[in-house]
Image (cartoon, helix red, strand yellow):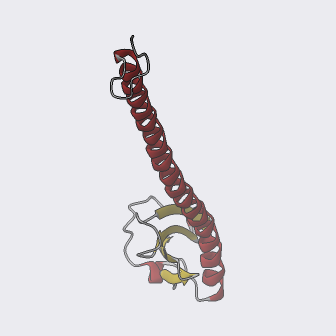
Amino acid sequence: MQRKNSLLIKPAKQLYKRGMAMIMAIAVLVIIATIMALSLALSSQTTKRTTDLYLYEQAVILSHSAAEYAMLKMSQVNPCSLTTLNYSYNNTYDINTSMKYIPLNGSTCATNAGTDILGLTTYPASDGTVILDVTVSTKAGIAPEPIRYFRRTIQKL
């Protein structure tokens, strides 16, 4: 008589199936781990990009406001006497504004502007013109990489 269900001896076919199931389970785990690692990297990169974009757009808007503020300050003081404005916004940004006046000989700006460092040819129509350089930059520790925006405009006083 032959015993068909032996507890000690397993047929080779069953052992082969169990080994394949384990290899497939490991492969599925590796694939899922790879997908999770890629999604985590993409998520952190997207968060950084979004933060940088927000800070950059705010710097652009602040540069426009700084130019208007500089024009207001220039209208409140003696002609061509204001050369720089430096201030901070919301303890996040440093805003530096410098002004270079385009004078004509004998004009109100000729005494305050000093030498013509711009090398421009001046005409009577350019008297009372100012070149505004506005630099907006984040303070240290706000963003992992510093964000800086520079804007140059020509304004008529």
Please give the name of the residue rendered at 40% of the width and 16% of the height, measured from the top-left corner.
Answer: 3
Instruction: Identify whether 2 is placed above or below 36.
Output: above
Residue 18 % position (x, y): 40, 26
Tell me if I can see residue 157 in this picture: no
Front-most of 33 and 114? 33
Residue 40 % position (x, y): 48, 49
Front-most of 47 and 20? 20
Quadrant (top left/top right/bottom left/bottom right) for the N terminus: top left
The residue furthest bottom is 77
Please give the name of the residue rendered at 45% of the width and 64% of the height, measured from the top-left corner.
Answer: 148
Tell me if I can see residue 64 in this picture: yes
The residue furthest top is 1
Please give the name of the residue rendered at 36% of the width and 26% of the height, measured from the top-left corner.
Answer: 19
Q: Quadrant of residue 14?
A: top left
User: Horizontally, is 73 left or right of 141 in the view?
Assistant: right
Residue 126 % position (x, y): 57, 63
Instruction: Identify whether 39 is placed above or below 106.
Output: above
Residue 45 % position (x, y): 48, 51
